[in-house]
Image (cartoon, grey):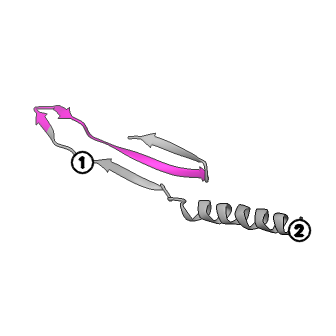
């Protein structure tokens, strides 16, 4: 019975450690780089920035500029 608990604890710790190693830090400002055309005062195409801040390991805030 003690061996079963030991195996369970080892498996749970393995899954916990592997999930921490796979964390990707998304913080930063990302800019879309695509072709745009300007006709007098008007800009045609796709452009913009996204600012990302981390609240916790499962939540982020995204600001579109």
Task: Indicate the quadrant containing the N terminus: top left, top right, bottom left or bottom right.
Answer: bottom right
Residue at the spot of label 2: 2
Residue 33, which numbered label? 1
Secondary structure type for disc 2:
helix
Q: Which residues, given as a range, are shown in magenta?
A: 37-56
Residue drawn 54% across and 59% down?
A: 23
Vertical placement of 16 versus 40: above or below? below
Q: Is residue 44 above or below residue 1?
A: above
On screen, residue 47 versus residue 16, left or right, reads: left
Which residue is painted at 77% across and 66% down in the image? Answer: 7
Secondary structure, magenta segment, majority class: strand
Q: Is-magenta flag for residue 48?
A: yes
Q: Give the camera-side residue of 2 and 43.
A: 2
Give left or right: position of 30 versus 46: right
Splitting the image into 4 quarters, where does residue 42 fall? top left
> x%, y% of residue 49?
35, 45
How many marks can you see? 2
**Outermost residue toward the left in this view:** 39
* Image location (x, y in percent) of residue 5: 84, 64
Disc nearer the start of the sequence (2/1): 2
> Would you say residue 54 sits in the magenta stretch?
yes
Q: Position of residue 52 (x, y in %)?
A: 47, 49
């Amino acid at each position: 019975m003690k061996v079963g608990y030991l195996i369970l604890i080892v498996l749970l710790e393995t899954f916990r450690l592997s999930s921490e190693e796979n964390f990707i830090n998304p913080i930063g400002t990302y800019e879309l780089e695509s072709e745009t055309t300007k006709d007098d005062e008007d800009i045609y195409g796709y452009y913009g920035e996204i600012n990302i801040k981390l609240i916790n390991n499962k939540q982020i805030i995204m600001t579109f500029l």
